[in-house]
């Protein structure tokens, strides 16, 4: 299994880095609908279902992985912009500055890094403390939909140590 993960990282990581070095797209500005009827605004806005096809969308998680855009992924994930790849840490204790070193070379630099801790929020090393965020997958979805440059490094829900 380790060989498969290494081969996947060997092919995915260069593509990830290359695509992230491209110029940052300008945020999309959407015009709000007319407010002639008080309820029309709420009838037309649905941030959960109206997601562009070119954006990553977390649709669920299991004890061992995640469902993103209809695809089941096993294990930990690293998401940057609209790219997803396997991530080496299998437990919270394996998350180190080295495991997050990709963010030293990614361009454009993400505005936010969301760190999903698995089932429980856990105390982190002071070097990683500013990365922790509850409800990581949901927060990623919202920030990504806003056109923000966002990255996520997530452990599956079932991880507890």
Image: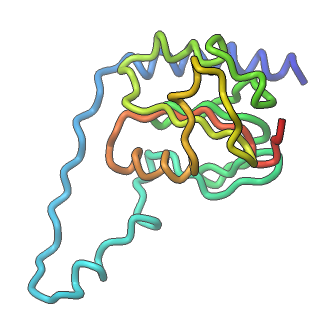
* Quarter of the image where the C terminus is located: top right
Q: Is residue 116 left or right of residue 34?
A: right
The percent coordinates of residue 89 (x first, y second) are: 75, 25
> Which residue is at a point 19% across and 51% down the rendered structure image?
29
The percent coordinates of residue 129 (x first, y second) are: 56, 27
Q: Is residue 127 left or right of residue 61?
A: left
Q: Is residue 66 above or below residue 116?
A: below
In the image, farthest residue toward the right: 1
Q: Is residue 131 left or right of residue 64?
A: left
How has the structure been colored for display? rainbow
* Quarter of the image where the N terminus is located: top right
How many numbered marks are there? 0
> Which residue is at a point 57% across and 47% down the rendered structure image?
134
Q: Is residue 158 above or below residue 111?
A: below
> Which residue is at a point 42% across and 21% down the rendered structure image?
20
In-front residue for pair 3/61: 61
> Which residue is at a point 50% across and 31% down the rendered structure image?
80
For residue 7, which quarter of the picture?
A: top right
In-front residue for pair 35/20: 35
The percent coordinates of residue 96 (x first, y second) are: 67, 17
Q: Is residue 77 left or right of residue 108?
A: right
């Amino acid at each position: 299994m380790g060989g498969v993960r290494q081969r996947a990282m060997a092919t995915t990581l260069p593509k990830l880095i290359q695509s992230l070095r491209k110029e940052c797209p300008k945020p999309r500005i959407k015009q709000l609908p007319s407010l002639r009827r008080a309820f029309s605004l709420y009838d037309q806005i649905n941030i959960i279902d109206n997601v562009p096809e070119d954006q990553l969308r977390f649709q669920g998680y299991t004890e061992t992985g995640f469902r993103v855009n209809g695809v089941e992924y096993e294990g930990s994930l690293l998401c940057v912009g609209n790219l997803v790849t396997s991530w080496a840490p299998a437990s919270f204790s394996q998350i180190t500055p080295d495991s997050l070193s990709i963010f030293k070379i990614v361009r454009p630099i993400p505005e936010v890094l969301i760190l999903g801790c698995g089932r429980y929020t856990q105390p982190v090393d002071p070097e990683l403390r500013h990365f922790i965020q509850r409800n990581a997958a949901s927060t990623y979805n919202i920030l990504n939909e806003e056109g923000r440059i966002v990255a996520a490094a997530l452990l599956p829900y079932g991880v507890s140590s």
